[in-house]
Amino acid sequence: MIALANNASIKLAANYIKSGELVIFPTETVYGLGADATNNAAIEELYEIKNRPGNNPLIIHISTIDDLAKISHVTPSAMVLAKTFWPGPLTLVLRRKLNSGIVADACSGLDTIAIRMPHNKVALDLIRLSKIPIAAPSANPSGRTSPTTAEHASSAIGNKVAMILDGGACRIGIESTVISLVQDPPLLLRPGDITVDEIEALIGSVNIPDQRTETAPSSPGRATSHYAPSLPVRLNAMDLVGDEALLAFGANTISKTNRVLNLSPDGSLEEAAANLYKMLIELDNPKYSGIAVMSIPNKGLGLAINDRLNRAAAKRS
Ligand code: TXA
Ligand code: MG
Protein backbone atom coordinates (compact mmCIF):
# COMPACT_ATOMS: atom_id res chain seq x y z
CA MET A 1 0.00 0.00 0.00
CA ILE A 2 1.32 3.45 -0.97
CA ALA A 3 0.19 6.19 1.44
CA LEU A 4 0.86 9.90 1.12
CA ALA A 5 3.11 10.81 4.05
CA ASN A 6 1.17 12.68 6.73
CA ASN A 7 0.93 12.49 10.53
CA ALA A 8 -1.51 9.58 10.46
CA SER A 9 0.33 7.49 7.86
CA ILE A 10 3.74 8.09 9.47
CA LYS A 11 2.29 6.96 12.80
CA LEU A 12 0.91 3.82 11.19
CA ALA A 13 4.28 3.17 9.53
CA ALA A 14 6.04 3.58 12.89
CA ASN A 15 3.71 0.98 14.37
CA TYR A 16 4.59 -1.40 11.55
CA ILE A 17 8.32 -0.86 12.24
CA LYS A 18 7.78 -1.45 15.98
CA SER A 19 5.96 -4.71 15.27
CA GLY A 20 8.82 -5.98 13.11
CA GLU A 21 7.38 -5.21 9.68
CA LEU A 22 9.19 -3.46 6.83
CA VAL A 23 8.32 0.01 5.53
CA ILE A 24 9.61 1.95 2.51
CA PHE A 25 10.13 5.64 3.32
CA PRO A 26 11.60 8.74 1.65
CA THR A 27 14.89 10.35 2.61
CA GLU A 28 16.59 13.35 1.00
CA THR A 29 18.90 10.97 -0.91
CA VAL A 30 16.93 7.90 -2.06
CA TYR A 31 13.98 5.85 -0.75
CA GLY A 32 14.96 3.48 2.05
CA LEU A 33 13.70 0.02 2.98
CA GLY A 34 13.34 0.35 6.75
CA ALA A 35 13.33 -2.21 9.54
CA ASP A 36 13.76 -2.13 13.33
CA ALA A 37 17.55 -2.34 13.71
CA THR A 38 17.11 -4.12 17.05
CA ASN A 39 14.87 -6.91 15.72
CA ASN A 40 16.66 -10.03 14.43
CA ALA A 41 13.74 -11.37 12.39
CA ALA A 42 13.06 -8.00 10.76
CA ILE A 43 16.71 -7.65 9.72
CA GLU A 44 16.75 -11.17 8.35
CA GLU A 45 13.64 -10.43 6.28
CA LEU A 46 15.19 -7.20 5.00
CA TYR A 47 18.23 -9.06 3.63
CA GLU A 48 15.94 -11.62 2.06
CA ILE A 49 13.68 -9.08 0.34
CA LYS A 50 16.67 -7.24 -1.17
CA ASN A 51 18.50 -10.47 -1.95
CA ARG A 52 21.43 -8.70 -0.30
CA PRO A 53 24.59 -10.65 0.54
CA GLY A 54 24.98 -11.06 4.31
CA ASN A 55 28.46 -9.52 4.18
CA ASN A 56 27.10 -6.13 3.08
CA PRO A 57 26.20 -4.19 6.27
CA LEU A 58 23.31 -1.71 6.59
CA ILE A 59 23.21 1.97 7.51
CA ILE A 60 21.51 2.61 10.85
CA HIS A 61 19.31 5.73 10.79
CA ILE A 62 18.85 7.85 13.93
CA SER A 63 16.82 10.98 14.63
CA THR A 64 19.07 12.80 17.13
CA ILE A 65 22.83 13.21 17.52
CA ASP A 66 22.46 11.98 21.11
CA ASP A 67 21.71 8.50 19.79
CA LEU A 68 25.12 8.32 18.12
CA ALA A 69 26.91 7.56 21.41
CA LYS A 70 24.36 4.89 22.33
CA ILE A 71 25.37 2.65 19.44
CA SER A 72 28.95 3.67 18.56
CA HIS A 73 32.21 4.87 20.08
CA VAL A 74 32.16 8.52 19.08
CA THR A 75 35.43 10.21 18.11
CA PRO A 76 36.07 13.98 18.10
CA SER A 77 36.07 14.00 14.26
CA ALA A 78 32.74 12.17 14.23
CA MET A 79 31.25 14.77 16.56
CA VAL A 80 32.46 17.67 14.40
CA LEU A 81 31.07 16.06 11.22
CA ALA A 82 27.75 15.14 12.85
CA LYS A 83 27.27 18.61 14.30
CA THR A 84 28.07 20.23 10.94
CA PHE A 85 26.28 17.97 8.49
CA TRP A 86 23.43 16.28 10.39
CA PRO A 87 20.68 16.00 9.66
CA GLY A 88 22.02 15.41 6.17
CA PRO A 89 23.47 13.07 3.53
CA LEU A 90 26.56 11.90 5.41
CA THR A 91 27.08 8.40 6.86
CA LEU A 92 29.77 7.86 9.50
CA VAL A 93 31.43 4.46 10.00
CA LEU A 94 32.59 4.11 13.61
CA ARG A 95 33.46 1.38 16.12
CA ARG A 96 30.25 -0.36 17.15
CA LYS A 97 29.09 -0.55 20.78
CA LEU A 98 28.60 -4.26 21.14
CA ASN A 99 25.83 -4.21 23.76
CA SER A 100 23.66 -1.48 22.20
CA GLY A 101 20.84 -3.75 21.08
CA ILE A 102 21.56 -3.25 17.36
CA VAL A 103 21.39 -6.66 15.67
CA ALA A 104 24.95 -7.82 14.86
CA ASP A 105 23.81 -9.14 11.47
CA ALA A 106 22.68 -5.61 10.48
CA CYS A 107 26.40 -4.77 10.68
CA SER A 108 27.40 -8.09 9.09
CA GLY A 109 28.97 -9.02 12.42
CA LEU A 110 31.69 -6.38 11.98
CA ASP A 111 32.96 -4.40 14.95
CA THR A 112 32.07 -1.23 13.03
CA ILE A 113 28.71 0.42 12.35
CA ALA A 114 27.47 2.89 9.70
CA ILE A 115 25.19 5.62 11.06
CA ARG A 116 23.34 8.57 9.60
CA MET A 117 20.68 11.11 10.58
CA PRO A 118 18.68 11.92 7.44
CA HIS A 119 17.48 15.39 6.47
CA ASN A 120 13.91 14.62 5.56
CA LYS A 121 10.99 15.36 7.85
CA VAL A 122 9.10 12.16 7.02
CA ALA A 123 12.19 10.05 7.74
CA LEU A 124 12.98 11.88 10.99
CA ASP A 125 9.35 11.68 12.20
CA LEU A 126 9.25 7.97 11.38
CA ILE A 127 12.43 7.24 13.36
CA ARG A 128 11.30 9.44 16.27
CA LEU A 129 7.85 7.83 16.47
CA SER A 130 9.28 4.33 16.18
CA LYS A 131 11.59 5.14 19.13
CA ILE A 132 14.21 2.79 17.71
CA PRO A 133 17.08 3.13 15.22
CA ILE A 134 15.98 2.07 11.73
CA ALA A 135 18.21 0.03 9.44
CA ALA A 136 17.60 1.21 5.88
CA PRO A 137 19.36 0.28 2.67
CA SER A 138 18.11 1.78 -0.59
CA ALA A 139 14.73 0.26 -1.51
CA ASN A 140 15.88 -1.76 -4.54
CA PRO A 141 16.91 -5.35 -5.15
CA SER A 142 20.64 -5.69 -4.44
CA GLY A 143 22.80 -4.37 -7.29
CA ARG A 144 20.01 -2.54 -9.12
CA THR A 145 19.11 1.13 -9.56
CA SER A 146 18.02 2.94 -6.39
CA PRO A 147 14.51 4.45 -6.32
CA THR A 148 14.00 8.20 -5.86
CA THR A 149 10.21 8.14 -6.11
CA ALA A 150 7.57 6.09 -4.26
CA GLU A 151 6.38 4.65 -7.60
CA HIS A 152 9.83 3.37 -8.51
CA ALA A 153 10.29 1.87 -5.03
CA SER A 154 6.86 0.30 -5.33
CA SER A 155 7.56 -1.36 -8.68
CA ALA A 156 10.93 -2.66 -7.42
CA ILE A 157 9.90 -4.33 -4.13
CA GLY A 158 6.56 -2.75 -3.13
CA ASN A 159 4.64 -6.00 -2.86
CA LYS A 160 7.01 -7.27 -0.18
CA VAL A 161 6.53 -4.57 2.48
CA ALA A 162 3.76 -3.55 4.89
CA MET A 163 3.61 0.01 3.61
CA ILE A 164 5.20 2.65 1.36
CA LEU A 165 5.27 6.24 2.59
CA ASP A 166 5.12 8.62 -0.38
CA GLY A 167 7.01 11.83 0.33
CA GLY A 168 7.51 12.89 -3.29
CA ALA A 169 10.76 12.89 -5.26
CA CYS A 170 14.01 12.78 -3.27
CA ARG A 171 15.73 16.18 -3.22
CA ILE A 172 19.32 14.98 -3.77
CA GLY A 173 18.74 11.77 -5.70
CA ILE A 174 21.94 9.81 -4.95
CA GLU A 175 22.96 8.03 -1.76
CA SER A 176 24.75 9.63 1.19
CA THR A 177 28.50 10.15 1.32
CA VAL A 178 30.01 7.31 3.42
CA ILE A 179 33.21 7.97 5.35
CA SER A 180 35.03 5.56 7.63
CA LEU A 181 36.55 7.14 10.75
CA VAL A 182 37.95 3.89 12.13
CA GLN A 183 41.23 4.35 10.32
CA ASP A 184 43.67 7.22 10.17
CA PRO A 185 43.47 9.06 7.84
CA PRO A 186 39.73 8.53 7.36
CA LEU A 187 38.65 6.71 4.20
CA LEU A 188 35.97 7.80 1.73
CA LEU A 189 33.85 4.70 1.05
CA ARG A 190 31.23 6.32 -1.17
CA PRO A 191 31.18 9.83 -2.68
CA GLY A 192 27.95 11.80 -2.32
CA ASP A 193 26.43 15.24 -1.97
CA ILE A 194 28.76 16.14 0.92
CA THR A 195 32.13 16.42 -0.79
CA VAL A 196 35.61 15.41 0.36
CA ASP A 197 36.62 19.09 0.30
CA GLU A 198 33.85 19.96 2.77
CA ILE A 199 34.92 17.08 5.03
CA GLU A 200 38.66 17.82 4.80
CA ALA A 201 38.05 21.45 5.73
CA LEU A 202 36.85 20.18 9.11
CA ILE A 203 38.90 17.08 9.95
CA GLY A 204 41.96 17.20 7.69
CA SER A 205 43.12 14.85 4.97
CA VAL A 206 40.92 11.94 3.82
CA ASN A 207 42.01 8.94 1.71
CA ILE A 208 40.11 8.19 -1.49
CA PRO A 209 40.33 4.63 -2.85
CA ASP A 210 40.94 4.46 -6.61
CA GLN A 211 38.08 2.47 -8.13
CA ARG A 212 40.23 1.40 -11.11
CA THR A 213 43.05 -0.14 -9.07
CA GLU A 214 41.03 -1.32 -6.08
CA THR A 215 41.42 -5.08 -5.68
CA ALA A 216 39.95 -5.93 -2.29
CA PRO A 217 36.98 -3.56 -1.87
CA SER A 218 37.39 -1.50 1.33
CA SER A 219 33.64 -1.63 1.93
CA PRO A 220 31.43 -4.60 1.09
CA GLY A 221 29.06 -2.26 -0.77
CA ARG A 222 31.83 -1.16 -3.15
CA ALA A 223 31.11 -4.02 -5.53
CA THR A 224 32.15 -3.02 -9.03
CA SER A 225 28.76 -3.70 -10.60
CA HIS A 226 26.00 -1.83 -8.80
CA TYR A 227 23.12 0.61 -9.43
CA ALA A 228 22.55 -1.24 -12.71
CA PRO A 229 19.45 -1.05 -14.91
CA SER A 230 18.53 -4.19 -16.90
CA LEU A 231 19.87 -2.68 -20.15
CA PRO A 232 23.61 -2.33 -20.75
CA VAL A 233 24.98 1.15 -20.01
CA ARG A 234 27.63 2.82 -22.22
CA LEU A 235 29.47 5.89 -20.91
CA ASN A 236 30.96 9.02 -22.50
CA ALA A 237 28.77 8.53 -25.56
CA MET A 238 29.38 10.82 -28.54
CA ASP A 239 26.77 9.14 -30.73
CA LEU A 240 24.00 6.52 -30.60
CA VAL A 241 24.64 2.93 -31.64
CA GLY A 242 21.80 0.68 -32.81
CA ASP A 243 18.62 1.12 -30.82
CA GLU A 244 20.21 2.80 -27.83
CA ALA A 245 18.35 5.40 -25.80
CA LEU A 246 20.29 8.52 -24.78
CA LEU A 247 20.81 9.97 -21.33
CA ALA A 248 22.06 13.46 -22.17
CA PHE A 249 23.75 16.12 -20.06
CA GLY A 250 24.01 19.81 -20.97
CA ALA A 251 23.77 20.82 -24.63
CA ASN A 252 22.61 17.70 -26.46
CA THR A 253 24.25 17.62 -29.86
CA ILE A 254 23.71 13.89 -30.39
CA SER A 255 20.04 13.18 -30.82
CA LYS A 256 16.76 14.95 -30.34
CA THR A 257 14.42 12.00 -30.80
CA ASN A 258 11.90 10.81 -28.25
CA ARG A 259 14.34 8.26 -26.87
CA VAL A 260 16.31 10.96 -25.10
CA LEU A 261 16.13 12.22 -21.54
CA ASN A 262 18.37 15.08 -20.39
CA LEU A 263 19.80 14.98 -16.85
CA SER A 264 20.21 18.75 -16.94
CA PRO A 265 19.96 20.81 -20.15
CA ASP A 266 21.64 23.67 -18.24
CA GLY A 267 24.54 21.46 -17.13
CA SER A 268 23.68 21.62 -13.40
CA LEU A 269 25.24 18.73 -11.45
CA GLU A 270 22.64 19.10 -8.67
CA GLU A 271 19.82 18.72 -11.17
CA ALA A 272 21.63 15.80 -12.84
CA ALA A 273 22.03 13.96 -9.51
CA ALA A 274 18.36 14.46 -8.68
CA ASN A 275 17.35 13.06 -12.10
CA LEU A 276 19.97 10.29 -12.44
CA TYR A 277 18.20 7.19 -11.09
CA LYS A 278 14.72 8.35 -12.13
CA MET A 279 15.82 8.76 -15.76
CA LEU A 280 17.90 5.56 -15.81
CA ILE A 281 14.81 3.66 -14.67
CA GLU A 282 12.59 5.45 -17.20
CA LEU A 283 14.95 4.59 -20.08
CA ASP A 284 15.35 0.99 -18.89
CA ASN A 285 12.85 -0.30 -21.43
CA PRO A 286 13.30 -3.52 -23.47
CA LYS A 287 12.38 -1.65 -26.65
CA TYR A 288 15.88 -0.11 -26.51
CA SER A 289 19.15 -2.02 -26.95
CA GLY A 290 21.03 -0.07 -24.28
CA ILE A 291 21.46 3.28 -22.55
CA ALA A 292 24.18 5.61 -23.85
CA VAL A 293 25.20 8.32 -21.39
CA MET A 294 26.94 11.58 -22.33
CA SER A 295 29.99 12.49 -20.26
CA ILE A 296 29.54 14.32 -16.94
CA PRO A 297 32.28 16.63 -15.55
CA ASN A 298 34.25 14.77 -12.89
CA LYS A 299 34.26 17.44 -10.20
CA GLY A 300 32.15 18.30 -7.16
CA LEU A 301 28.92 16.32 -7.20
CA GLY A 302 30.01 14.97 -10.61
CA LEU A 303 32.40 12.62 -8.77
CA ALA A 304 29.44 10.96 -7.05
CA ILE A 305 27.40 10.83 -10.25
CA ASN A 306 30.30 9.24 -12.18
CA ASP A 307 30.93 6.77 -9.33
CA ARG A 308 27.34 5.50 -9.77
CA LEU A 309 27.50 5.55 -13.59
CA ASN A 310 30.82 3.65 -13.65
CA ARG A 311 29.30 0.92 -11.49
CA ALA A 312 26.05 0.87 -13.53
CA ALA A 313 28.19 0.36 -16.67
CA ALA A 314 30.61 -2.16 -15.11
CA LYS A 315 30.78 -5.76 -16.30
CA ARG A 316 28.11 -7.77 -14.49
CA SER A 317 28.95 -11.07 -12.87
O1 TXA B 1 21.58 7.69 1.33
C1 TXA B 1 21.70 6.60 1.89
O2 TXA B 1 22.67 6.31 2.59
C2 TXA B 1 20.55 5.59 1.69
C3 TXA B 1 19.29 6.11 2.41
C4 TXA B 1 18.15 5.13 2.41
O3 TXA B 1 19.63 6.53 3.71
N1 TXA B 1 20.92 4.28 2.17
C5 TXA B 1 21.83 3.51 1.51
O4 TXA B 1 22.05 2.26 2.05
O5 TXA B 1 22.41 3.90 0.52
P1 TXA B 1 22.76 1.09 1.24
O6 TXA B 1 22.56 -0.13 2.06
O7 TXA B 1 22.25 1.04 -0.15
O8 TXA B 1 24.28 1.47 1.28
C6 TXA B 1 25.01 1.33 2.50
C7 TXA B 1 26.49 1.41 2.23
C8 TXA B 1 26.99 0.15 1.58
O9 TXA B 1 27.93 0.50 0.59
C9 TXA B 1 27.66 -0.58 2.76
O10 TXA B 1 28.67 -1.46 2.36
C10 TXA B 1 28.21 0.59 3.55
O11 TXA B 1 27.19 1.57 3.47
N2 TXA B 1 28.44 0.19 4.97
C11 TXA B 1 27.52 -0.06 5.92
N3 TXA B 1 28.10 -0.43 7.08
C12 TXA B 1 29.43 -0.39 6.88
C13 TXA B 1 30.57 -0.68 7.69
N4 TXA B 1 30.45 -1.06 8.94
N5 TXA B 1 31.79 -0.53 7.12
C14 TXA B 1 31.93 -0.14 5.83
N6 TXA B 1 30.88 0.13 5.02
C15 TXA B 1 29.65 0.00 5.52
MG1 MG C 1 22.01 0.72 -2.19
Image: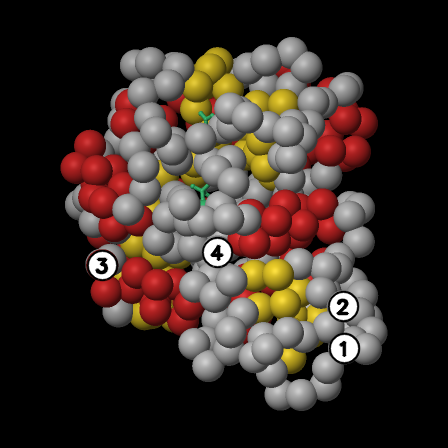
Q: Is mark 2 within 8 Å of ligand 2?
A: no
User: Is residue 50 visible in this depiction of the protein?
Assistant: yes
Q: Earlier in the sequence, mark 1 or mark 2?
A: 2
C-beta proximity under 8 Å, tags 4 and 1: no
Q: Are marks 1 and 2 in contact (CB under 8 Å)?
A: yes
Q: To which residue does mark 1 refer?
A: 254
Looking at marks 3 and 1 on the same chain, the residue that comes earlier in the sequence is marked by 3
Q: Helix, strand, or loop for circle 2?
A: loop
Is 276 positioned to the left or the right of 52 in the image?
Answer: right
Amino acid type of the residue that numbered disc 3 sits on in the rendered structure: Lys
- Looking at the image, residue 70 lies above or below residue 241: above
Discs 4, 3 touching: Cβ within 8 Å: no
Q: Which mark is residue 228?
A: 4
Q: Report, in whole angstroms, how far the alpha carbon at label 3 lies from the one at label 2.
A: 40 Å
Q: Residue at x 56, y 54 (%)?
A: 313
Q: Position of residue 224 (x, y in %)?
A: 52, 40
Give the label on residue 238, or none. Answer: 2
Q: Earlier in the sequence, mark 4 or mark 3?
A: 3
Mark 2 neighbour density, 10 Å: few (under 14) some (14–19) many (20 or more): some
The answer to whether marks 3 and 1 mark residues whose Cβ atoms lie closer than 8 Å is: no
Of residues 266 and 169, the one drawn nearer to the viewer in this rendering: 266
Say which residue label 3 marks: 160
Of callouts 4 and 1, the N-terminal one: 4
Residue depicted at x 79% and y 33%: 197
Which amino acid is tagged 2? Met
**How many residues crowd mark 1 within 10 Å: few (<14), some (14–19), many (20+)?**
some
Task: Give the CA separation, mark 3 to mark 1.
Answer: 40 Å
Please provide percent x and percent y for residue 305: 66, 52
- The amino acid type found where label 4 is placed reads Ala
Pick whichever, 126 or 178, lies toward us.
178
